[in-house]
Image (cartoon, rainbow, N blue to C red):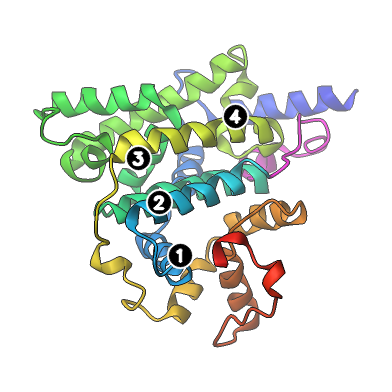
Amino acid sequence: MAKSSVAKKGLDKAAKLAVNEDGTLNPRAQSMLSKLLSVQRPVALAYVRSLRRKNPEATPEELIKIIRRHYLALTTSGGAAVGATAAVPGLGTTAALGVATAETAGFLEGTALFAQAISEIHGLPVQDSKRANALVLGLMLGKDGKNLVQRFNKQAGGTESMFSNWGSTVTKQLPTPVVDLLLRKLRKTFIRKFAARAGGSLIGRLLPFGIGAIIGGVVNAQMARKVADESKEAFGAAPTIFPLETDPEYVAPKKDRKLLAGLKNVAALRDKVKKKKAIESDVIDEAAEEDSSHTDSATDNRSEDDRPELEK
């Protein structure tokens, strides 16, 4: 049997286990997606503080631009594999369902970090994973995500005048039971949107669940740009001052480096990008080095010419 046929057969079988016929996720797939679409709040804060240490004169607006540049550099330069043939042949059904490649897992985790970091700068802490999931899915769905948030907000008795940007609606305004309903609808819409792009095939339904060989770098890049653009409308104009918890002095740098070292999927994708010399940020890199060497400082011995542009 041809390699492509083996790959398609295995992925079709995995898709049936991941996604129900009505477009909902089974518990295992739902848990995997939820984990990738959120980061712990302390990690998002550590990321913002680390960037502020590297850019001490940056205003909130300037730091948001830096975060956006870092996100796009990470997610649009990964060089993901194209097609399933090279990566999936021989992969068992269980493995196909549970494995998230560096491209896709890093993309989803990086998107969650991006969204939550900007939310923190706007003084909108994301207190739980469900709100984080709703925020990230809303950004990835673009206009469809925004419309769903506004619809559920109105059904909950909210008005557009209460909050001018939908990011605050998700993080602050919506009652928890409504967030649960919104999240289920966002997930289903996300799956259907991908399936439509893949002609309704079962393989298309697998796109959101970490089969990076299929989702590919092109799709990641397109969605990353959509997320970056949509974030401007979701959060609105940058604040004039930073929230207290984003102050570089609020937590010791060593503790922040330890928190950032937990971003394993982002670190894996960053490593792939660095091989192509395409990434600008060294924040996560230092955290990974700290985690592996257990030193008290992340000494940078590079020459001035070798330093990323944003560090100069």
Report the Cα–Cα distance between label 4 and label 3.
Answer: 21 Å
Q: Quadrant of residue 89?
A: top right
One can see residue 26 in this view:
no
Amino acid tagged 2: Ile
Q: Earlier in the sequence, mark 1 or mark 4?
A: 1
Q: What stretch is highlighted in magenta?
A: 78-100
Which comes sooner in the sequence, label 3 or label 1? 1
Residue type, numbered disc 3? Leu
**Predominant secondary structure, magenta span:** loop
Considering only order in the chain, which callout, 2 or 1, is on the residue closer to the N terminus? Answer: 1
Q: Residue at the location (40% across, 81% down)?
A: 252
Question: Is there a contact, CB below 8 Å, between mark 2 and mark 4?
Answer: no
Disc 1 designates what residue? 51
Callout 2: SS: helix
SS of the residue under disc 3? helix
**Quarter of the view holding residue 236:** top left
Q: Is residue 164 left or right of residue 254?
A: left
Residue 179 spot, x, y in % from top left: 25, 37
From the viewer's side, name the closer residue of 248 and 261.
248
For residue 102, side relative to residue 188 (left or right): right
In the picture as drawn, the residue positioned furthest to the right comes out as 1
Image coordinates of residue 160 in percent, x first then y, are 15, 28
| Gap in angstroms between the C-alphas marked 2 and 4 | 32 Å
**Earlier along the polypeptide chain: callout 4 or callout 3?**
3
Looking at numbered disc 1 in the image, what kind of residue is underneath it?
Leu
